[in-house]
Image (tube, coloured by chain):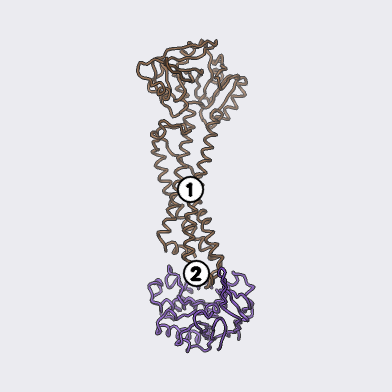
Chain colours: A brown, B purple
């Protein structure tokens, strides 16, 4: 049975090669794309943590996410307590205020983030994306720079409402550009030394938040629960809470990709079913002969399903091997997405080179995908062959 | 001893609006060890009659019995098993599987009949039947590498390798030259005489008919004489 199925596949090499090729391409695509999406996801989370959320955030209980108001008055009290927790590797203070930039002609709304440059480095990697140290200047997001067409020596005015409600303004000259993988930061964030910001807004020790780096980001949820019981008067969130919206969007994207993959598999099924159907038509008289010499309908069906299984296994194996090789290259070297992501927000917090990841589940799925696809695809042509009587098959022209 | 009995057999083919009566009330009995020719012009119903005798097709009306067992009530799987166990078929256009070698074409029929036969025993039987039909030196060739007469010999070997009780041959010499055709009929007669296999074959070749022990004449789907 298997021998005949194998020889049948070799009979029309071009057709077999076409089906095999469709399957191989579909499965290779599946493995590489899932690896690529995994890479985007992993890099996005890594960048989100490194640039925006850290592992955990402590805020005042009355903190308002929209106005960014609600301050921790004495952060040192909290920080003293944080020292007791061995899983906390570093922490830093940030003061965030809503404001706007203007150049005398145009205004642009921004989030002003006051940071302690040295302590911030221990928790965030923002500094890696700035073209100069912060010192007494500011970092402005690359899109803001583009908006104002800022050049060397140009002045900008930073405006905001101070602690007592009075609008204050400061002229800033030293501007370094911050070009991060986070479109939101590039588009709306300005970084300034926290002491300068406090002076400007008449703040004392107040901060909006204390950002914490732990020894393991995956344990942030359990660490958060431990801190919640110790800091009952504060709002404590993990990076999972902070990135809830971004993670939800990411899941939606994965669902959209699943739909895309479904269509690719569907094309594979249709391609395979089509070639097997033609094969059944062409072999109708032979099916009649086999039935005449005593092959049962079920055995005829098995024969065609065996052809499907053989081509499916071959297509799957080659697709998996090629997929693994291509994915391996991208895992090691990555893909430079700069030209594509330069000025476009694709919803992922990535820039430059993104390395693929290994998705073992998708490789295992791919191994079964080929044979299952072809079994499914060959079922209907086989059923047709099965239903015909031997006399009908023998009369077939 | 009657082994196949046909009573009032009618076969109608329906193709869209058209209905073609291929057989019109045939009554026939085939006994063990017969060497029978079914003769008649094209379209007289010879192939249909052989197909019904060999469980390849079922009649529209009437009854067919094999060893006293009614065939109409059998399921397709049961009919396939009857064909596998009792019948060998020889077709006008040989109907060999082109991707298989001579050996494999014969082997497939043997494997279906005796699933648990040892490889050595299988080999022995196949080579022996190929020798009987004069093809022992061509066992590894593909059908398309053989002449028409040789292909028909493979077809005969495939039909006989499983020791069937009946061999039904549909115009086995129609695609062969007269000399080759004669040698094929001689071979069939030899196997009939030596092994006691019941042969029923259709033909309209008078040279072949003269070798038959019994001749059934068909015209317009009816038996018009013996």
**Residue A383 seen in the figure:** yes
Q: Position of residue A286 (x, y in %)?
A: 48, 69
Q: Is residue A121 above or below residue A337?
A: above
Q: Nearer the viewer, mark 1 or mark 2?
A: 2
**Residue B115 seen in the figure:** no
Q: Residue furthest front?
A: B17
x 48%, y 39%: residue: A38
x 49%, y 58%: residue: A308
Q: Is residue A195 above or below residue A237?
A: above
Numbered label attached to residue A396: 2
N-terminal-most mark, 1 or 2: 1
- The chain that hosts pointer 1 is A
Other-residue count near label 2 (Cα within 10 Å), few / some / many at <14 / 14–19 / ≥20: some
Q: Secondary structure at mark 2?
A: loop
Q: Are marks 1 and 2 in contact (CB under 8 Å)?
A: no
Name the residue nearer the viewer: B119 or A309.
A309
Q: Secondary structure at mark 1?
A: helix
Instruction: Quarter of the image for the C terminus of chain B: give it.
Output: bottom right
Name the residue nearer the viewer: B105 or B62.
B62
Q: Is residue B113 above or below residue A36?
A: below
Numbered label attached to residue A264: 1
Q: Position of residue A257 (x, y in %)?
A: 50, 41
Instruction: Quarter of the image for the N terminus of chain B: give it.
Output: bottom right
Other-residue count near label 1 (Cα within 10 Å), few / some / many at <14 / 14–19 / ≥20: some
**Tally of numbered tags:** 2
Q: CA distance from mark 1 to mark 2?
A: 34 Å
Q: Position of residue A97 (x, y in %)?
A: 51, 17
- The chain that hosts pointer 2 is A
């Amino acid at each position: 049975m298997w021998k005949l199925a194998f020889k049948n596949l070799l009979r029309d090499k071009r057709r077999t090669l076409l089906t095999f090729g469709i399957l191989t391409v579909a499965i290779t695509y599946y493995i590489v794309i899932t690896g690529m999406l995994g890479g985007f996801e992993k890099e996005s989370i890594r960048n989100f943590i490194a640039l925006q959320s850290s592992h955990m955030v402590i805020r005042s209980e009355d903190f308002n996410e929209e106005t960014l108001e609600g301050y921790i008055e004495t952060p040192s009290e909290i920080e003293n307590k944080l020292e007791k927790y061995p899983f906390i590797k570093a922490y830093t203070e940030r003061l965030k205020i809503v404001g706007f930039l203007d150049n005398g002609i145009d205004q642009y709304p921004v989030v002003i983030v006051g940071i302690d440059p040295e302590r911030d480095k221990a928790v965030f990697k923002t500094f890696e994306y700035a073209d100069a140290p912060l010192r007494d200047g500011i970092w402005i997001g690359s899109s803001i720079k583009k908006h104002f067409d800022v050049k060397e020596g140009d002045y900008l005015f930073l405006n905001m409402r101070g602690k007592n409600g009075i609008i204050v303004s400061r002229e800033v000259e030293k501007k370094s550009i911050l070009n991060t993988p986070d479109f939101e930061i590039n588009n709306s964030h300005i970084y300034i030394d926290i002491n300068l910001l406090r002076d400007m807004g008449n703040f004392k020790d107040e901060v909006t938040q204390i950002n914490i780096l732990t020894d393991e980001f995956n344990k942030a949820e359990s660490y958060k629960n431990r801190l919640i019981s110790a800091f009952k008067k504060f709002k404590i969130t993990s990076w999972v809470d902070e990135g809830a919206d971004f993670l939800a969007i990411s899941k939606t994207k994965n669902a959209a990709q699943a739909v895309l993959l479904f269509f690719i598999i569907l094309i594979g099924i249709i391609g395979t079913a089509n070639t097997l159907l033609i094969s059944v038509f062409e072999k109708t008289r032979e099916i009649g002969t086999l039935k005449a010499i005593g092959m049962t309908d079920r055995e005829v069906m098995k024969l065609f399903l065996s052809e499907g299984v053989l081509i499916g296994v071959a297509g799957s194996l080659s697709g998996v091997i090629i997929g693994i090789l291509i994915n391996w290259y991208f895992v090691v070297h990555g893909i430079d997405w700069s030209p594509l992501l330069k000025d476009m927000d694709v919803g992922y917090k990535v820039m430059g080179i993104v390395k693929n990841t290994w998705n073992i589940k998708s490789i295992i799925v791919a191994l079964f995908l080929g044979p299952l696809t072809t079994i499914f695809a060959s079922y209907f042509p086989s059923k047709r062959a099965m239903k015909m009587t031997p006399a009908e098959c023998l009369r077939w022209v | 001893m009657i082994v196949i009995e046909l009573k009032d057999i009618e076969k109608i083919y329906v193709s869209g609006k058209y209905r073609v009566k291929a057989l019109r009330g045939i009554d026939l009995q085939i006994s063990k060890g017969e060497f029978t020719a079914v003769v008649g012009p094209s379209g007289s119903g010879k192939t249909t009659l052989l197909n019904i005798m060999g469980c390849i097709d079922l009649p529209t009306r009437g009854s067919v019995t094999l060893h006293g067992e009614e065939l109409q009530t059998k399921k397709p799987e049961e009919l396939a098993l009857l064909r596998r166990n009792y019948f060998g078929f020889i077709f006008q256009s040989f109907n060999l599987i082109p991707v298989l070698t001579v050996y494999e074409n014969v082997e497939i029929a043997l494997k279906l009949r005796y699933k648990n036969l040892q490889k050595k025993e299988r080999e022995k039987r196949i080579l022996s039947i190929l020798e009987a039909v004069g093809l022992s030196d061509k066992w590894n060739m593909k059908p398309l590498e053989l002449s028409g007469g040789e292909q028909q010999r493979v077809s005969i070997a495939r039909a006989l390798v499983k020791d069937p009780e009946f061999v039904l041959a549909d115009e086995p010499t129609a695609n062969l030259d007269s000399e080759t055709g004669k040698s094929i009929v001689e071979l069939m007669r030899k196997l009939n005489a030596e092994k006691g296999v019941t042969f029923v074959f259709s033909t309209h070749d008078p040279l072949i008919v003269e070798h038959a022990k019994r001749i059934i004449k068909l015209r317009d789907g009816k038996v018009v004489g013996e």
